[in-house]
Image (tube, helix red, strand yellow):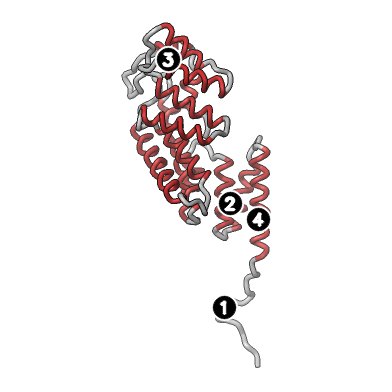
Amino acid sequence: MKMGIFVKAFVGLACAASLLIGQAAAPVAKQPKPKSPKEVEAVMAMFNAQDPDARIAAAKELVTKFADTEFKELALLMEALSYQQKNDAENMILSAEQTLEANPQNYQAMLMIAEALAQRTRENDLDREEKLVRSEKMAKGAMEAIDKAPKPRADVTDEQWAGAKKDFAAQAHQALGMGAMVRKKYDVAIVELKTATEVGTQPDPATMVRLGAVYNLAGKPDEAIAVLDKVMATPDLHATIRQFAQAEKVRAVQAKSAKPAAPATPPGQVEIKN
């Protein structure tokens, strides 16, 4: 998941901005406030942590030492995001679930769970449907929550917030698309992944590679090649994404060349000579 405007609005805060900002006239989320100087120190230790492990430790300490802190939801969310950076999906899901206990409308936690379940579920898993149903529920719940959500902070412009909401919606559609792929509902997966590449502020190359892959699975190599060519034309494309895009394009080209050539005469109009 990308570090969107919502997270950056908190992770990059200076002390005065993060702790003293008030409610604005426009719809803005209520800002958490510390109750003591010691809590201020604990909050800032979390904000200033230099790596995921340090951030996780600071978040846990904040929630443990200050049980009534108004920063609990944020601490748990930052903990989940830090586990995500560490590729620790199990603990990420656990922290995201705890975030939802603090606020059932936290759409970022929903999106993390939705994407993790869809990405980690395999066709032959005994609990496949249970996990995919939950992933789908989380993705759709996130989209509903995003629609109603106020701006995270007063200094986030309406334009920035509109863009962030589009990117969050794209993540939800991506999760739905990945779940459909596991179920082999390729037509549904194509719709969801294509939507994910279109509704965000800019297409995510990794999502476009997934779209190319599902086009291949659906027997549509021409569409796959068109998408994958766009991916590989992306400036400064990550080497791993380029590698996957190239592999999928090879599959598409091979599939296309394996198709029988179109008949020179349309069926039903073949001239039969005696």
Amino acid at circle 4:
Arg
First in sequence: mark 1 vs mark 4: 4
The crowd level at tag 2 (other Cα within 10 Å; few <14, some 14-19, many 20+) is many
- The image's mark for residue 251 is 4
Percent coordinates x, y for residue 123 in the rendering: 52, 53
Task: State yes or no: discs 4 and 2 in contact (Cβ < 8 Å).
Answer: no
The crowd level at tag 3 (other Cα within 10 Å; few <14, some 14-19, many 20+) is few
Percent coordinates x, y for residue 88 in the rendering: 55, 33
Element assignment for label 1: loop
Marks 2 and 1: which is nearer the front? 2
Percent coordinates x, y for residue 127 in the rendering: 45, 49
Residue 98 visible to an observer of this rendering: yes
Task: State yes or no: discs 1 and 4 in contact (Cβ < 8 Å).
Answer: no
Report, in whole angstroms, how far the alpha carbon at label 1 lies from the one at label 4: 29 Å
User: Disc 1 marks which residue?
Assistant: 267
Residue at 42% over, 41% down: 139
Report, in whole angstroms, how far the alpha carbon at label 2 lies from the one at label 1: 32 Å
Could you tell me which quadrant the C terminus lies in? bottom right
Q: Nearer the viewer, residue 259 or 120?
A: 120
First in sequence: mark 2 vs mark 1: 2
Report, in whole angstroms, how far the alpha carbon at label 3 lies from the one at label 1: 78 Å
Marks 3 and 2: which is nearer the front? 3
Element assignment for label 4: helix
User: Disc 3 marks which residue?
Assistant: 65
Report, in whole angstroms, how far the alpha carbon at label 3 lies from the one at label 4: 55 Å
Amino acid at circle 2:
Ala
- The image's mark for residue 213 is 2
